[in-house]
Image (cartoon, rainbow, N blue to C red):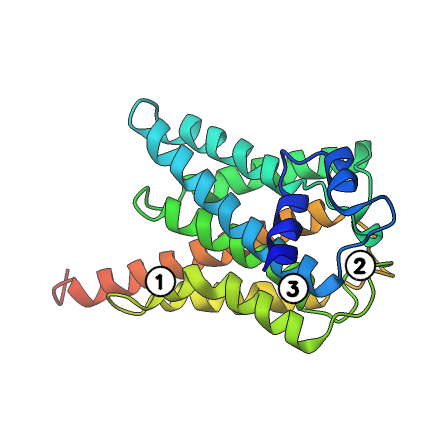
Amino acid sequence: MKKFLLAIAQQAPWHSRACAQHSVGPAAETPAGLSFAASAVMGLLGGLAAALIFLLSSALLATRPALVLGLLVGIWFAIPKPTHLGWSQPLGSKSAIAIGLLTVLKLEILAEIDPAWIPVVLICAAAWARVAALAARQDPLIGLGRAQPSARWVSLVIGALPLCFFGLWPEPVWGLWVAAGITLLFARSLRPDHWAAPIAVRWMACEVIYCLCALALMSAASLSEFAEEAPPGS
């Protein structure tokens, strides 16, 4: 448990590399399995933080400005400070531009969702995108090593926790689950030898795919309910 908590602390956005090396020693390296699970926990915490900021700021601001604040918190959590060599991919100018464009796209997508569902989508997208980008393949990152099936399944279970909470109770919300499946398929297609983007860019791309699928499925469900409620001949 101590190693797991330390792995989570190493991936926290406020944890510096110098502090990490002081904690585990200059030659120490976090196992890939713990890195996977810790990343899933940080994704969940990042989604919760973004949703909380959105809820608090939406009481004073309009939906879009509140979303901007929430997404900025999400970006802060999406750029961790891990010590494992496989994670040390610096963000260049192209990666920064990609993250900016993906954030704008995510903002426009979320702005079209019912404000009551925005915190739910923020949490589910952040938590599931992290685990999908890592657990969809045995070799998600060059230099990280092949992940054991148990580590991948543990991270998937952690990422699915908000889906189980919001997508099963009080009634199933299949749009959240279908969006998760599509995002997982998208993440599986991201071969590291074909697209060697930093992990933060991969996470953001998976988040955009999840939000886009959730918007499309929720819109389709709303149209279906409207068609069922419409009186004949209207």
The residue mark sitting in front, 3 or 2, is 2
Which amino acid type corresponds to the residue marked 1 in the rendered image? Phe
Which residue in the structure is indicated by mark 1? 165
Label 2: which secondary element: loop
- In front: mark 1 or mark 3? 1
Q: Which residue corresponds to the image point at 85% horizontal and 60% vertical from the top-left?
A: 194
Mark sitting earlier along the chain (2/1): 2
- Horizontal side, residue 149 vs residue 54: left or right: right
Label 1 and label 3: CA atoms lie apart by 24 Å
> Of the residues under marks 1 and 3, which one precedes in the sequence?
1
Instruction: Name above or below for residue 50 compared with residue 139.
Output: above
Q: The N terminus appears in which quarter of the rendering?
A: bottom right
Residue 140, quarter of picture: bottom right
Give how far apart the Cα atoms at labels 3 and 2 are: 15 Å
Work out whether residue 98 or residue 43 is closer to the camera in this orientation and state it.
43
Tell me the quadrant of the picture where the C terminus can be found. bottom left
Q: Earlier in the sequence, mark 3 or mark 2?
A: 2
* Dot 1 crowding, Cα within 10 Å, few <14, some 14–19, many 20+: few
**Between marks 2 and 1, how big is the CA–CA gap?**
30 Å
Q: Which mark is residue 186?
A: 3
Q: Which mark is residue 141?
A: 2
Among all residues in the image, which is located at the extreme bottom?
149
Q: Amino acid at mark 2?
A: Leu
- Badge 3 marks a residue whose secondary structure is helix
Front in this rendered view, residue 1 or 9: 1
- Amino acid identity at mark 3: Phe
